[in-house]
């Protein structure tokens, strides 16, 4: 039995004084005095919550291995220059005992030098070691010369525009999209290293009040590592995980469908990419970038291949999540929604005519409100088209939304995300607090094939977080200061332990 001020769910918002949990589920909700008497009669455990309780957050799009990777990587967020970036990597070198040195979080828009980093920058710091530094968006990175040589990137990707070259035709070290993904796959070959990342990612979710997560682009080795890690994560209990595997899941020797990984993790779908990111100018637009008329972005996969993968996934009973950031990418993603019932990831740039079409399709879409804070430069990229960006309010009226962070692209903290959705977004695009909380709990679980999550009504799973203040009684910057005191998964204390 749990007693206190307990939000059972939001929009409509219901409050109870007590809930009874049987097994992992909420069985009864009601009056604390009546429940206390019942608890004494039955000899149940009585838990007096020390704060305000609500359903745990469900992050509709995050990278569990990437969250843990960032815990071990050199943190380059906020670097104001390439010189500072190199200094941070240099100071962190002693903690990397293996072949690889890895870092994440830089943004060339902040650099005083006014340029992208190169392999020469990394060679100066790392010498002959394998080194990769991933941009904050995860769609671009820079690698050292040793990586280019040892992984034979020129031979593998010589004709690809995503292996960036200088005027003389030599690789600069900047790698985009599929080239960066290949580098990351090589880095992730160490199963024990990946196990550390997924364990750290699961712990960080619980500390943040995230009791459920849709893990996007999980590789087959990472899924195997998580299955192994779950044996060590029984205490504390792990979060609930809906896994959207990368397409290689469909190419295994025995093609697989939905697959349970323990009692709280399940492969439910696959993740596909149409385009890249606005930050790397690889998001696919219908007309050129305002700050670089030479490009309209990149089509990451041929639409015919996307259709083939959708058919293969649906034939195996798997859901499909499609990454689409630019408006031209949205055109392609919307066709996959219509034909295969796919869900859309991001929907960052949406034209007016596309809003009208979405109202007919009523698709599932995961949004990332914190992009509003991070992409402060977006007006330069898009010019007048900036009015089409991050239309959360309008999307909520034409689609089934879930809220997410794309962590480690954005901070995992739900309260920073909530702040971005209800305060930092422009007035005509922002969400209300209760609406945002509903979308970040019940809404996110619903679009991620996570049954009985997101509310604390009878029959729902008892995934509960306890807060140091009432989220409906704070506003402005105070929203970001809300702290998670306790996290329960299935009624069992998961944080702190």
Image: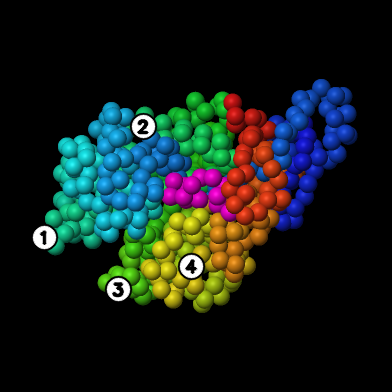
Q: Earlier in the sequence, mark 2 or mark 3?
A: 2
Question: Disc 2 versus disc 1: distance between alpha carbons?
Answer: 38 Å
Front disc: 2 or 3: 3
Q: Is residue 391 left or right of residue 324?
A: right
The answer to whether mark 2 and mark 1 are in CB contact below 8 A is: no
Whether residue 291 is situated above or below residue 461 in the rendered picture: below
| Depth check, front residue: 391 or 306 | 391
Q: Which residue is denoted by mark 2 in the rendering?
A: 193
Q: Earlier in the sequence, mark 2 or mark 4?
A: 2
Circle 2 sits in a helix, a strand or a loop, which is it?
helix
Q: Which residue is mark 3?
A: 293
Q: What's drawn in magenta, residue-wise?
A: 405-419
Quadrant hosting residue 329: bottom left
Q: Which image quadrant for residue 162?
A: bottom left
Q: Which residue is mark 1?
A: 168
Residue 389 circle label: 4
Task: Please name whichever residue, 463 or 243, is drawn nearer the observer in this view of the structure.
Answer: 463
């Amino acid at each position: 039995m749990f007693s206190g001020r307990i939000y059972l769910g939001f929009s409509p918002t219901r409050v109870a004084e007590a809930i009874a949990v049987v097994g992992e589920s909420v069985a009864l909700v009601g009056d604390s005095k009546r429940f206390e008497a019942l608890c004494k009669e039955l000899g149940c455990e009585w838990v007096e919550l020390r704060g305000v309780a609500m359903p745990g957050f469900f992050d509709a799009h995050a990278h569990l291995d990437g969250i843990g990777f960032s815990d071990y990587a050199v943190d380059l967020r906020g670097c104001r220059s390439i010189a500072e970036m190199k200094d941070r990597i240099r100071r962190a070198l002693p903690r990397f005992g293996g072949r690889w040195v890895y870092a994440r979080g830089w943004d060339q828009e902040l650099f005083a030098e006014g340029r992208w980093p190169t392999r020469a920058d990394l060679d100066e710091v790392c010498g002959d070691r394998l080194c990769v530094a991933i941009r904050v968006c995860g769609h671009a990175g820079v690698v050292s010369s040793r990586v280019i040589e040892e992984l034979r990137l020129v031979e593998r990707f010589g004709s690809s525009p995503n292996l960036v070259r200088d005027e003389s035709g030599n690789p600069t070290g900047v790698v985009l999209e599929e080239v960066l993904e290949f580098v990351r796959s090589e880095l992730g070959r160490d199963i024990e290293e990946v196990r550390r990342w997924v364990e750290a990612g699961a712990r960080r979710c619980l500390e943040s009040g995230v009791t459920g997560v849709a893990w996007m682009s999980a590789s087959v080795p990472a899924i195997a590592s998580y299955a192994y890690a779950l044996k060590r994560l029984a205490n504390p209990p792990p979060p609930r995980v809906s896994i959207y595997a990368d397409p290689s899941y469909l190419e295994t020797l025995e093609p697989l469908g939905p697959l349970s990984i323990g009692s709280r993790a399940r492969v439910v779908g696959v993740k596909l990419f149409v385009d890249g990111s606005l930050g790397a100018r690889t998001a696919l637009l219908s007309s050129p970038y305002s700050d670089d008329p030479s490009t309209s972005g990149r089509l990451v996969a041929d639409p015919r291949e996307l259709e083939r993968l959708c058919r293969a996934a649906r034939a195996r009973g798997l859901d499909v999540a499609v990454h689409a950031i630019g408006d031209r990418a949205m055109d392609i993603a919307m066709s996959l929604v219509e034909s295969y019932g796919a869900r859309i990831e991001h929907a960052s740039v949406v034209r007016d005519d596309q809003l009208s079409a979405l109202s007919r399709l009523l698709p599932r879409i995961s949004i990332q409100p914190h992009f509003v804070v991070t992409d402060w430069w977006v007006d330069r990229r898009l010019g007048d088209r900036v009015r089409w960006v991050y239309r959360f309010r309008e999307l909520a009226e034409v689609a089934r939304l879930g809220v997410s962070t794309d962590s480690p692209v954005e901070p995992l903290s739900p309260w920073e995300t909530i702040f971005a959705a209800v305060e930092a977004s422009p007035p005509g695009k922002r969400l209300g607090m209760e609406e945002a909380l509903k979308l970040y709990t019940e809404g996110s679980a619903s679009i991620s094939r996570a049954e009985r999550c997101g509310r604390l009504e009878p029959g729902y799973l008892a995934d509960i977080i306890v807060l140091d203040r009432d989220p409906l009684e704070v506003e402005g910057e105070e929203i970001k200061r809300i702290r998670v005191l306790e996290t329960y998964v299935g009624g069992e204390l998961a944080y702190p332990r």
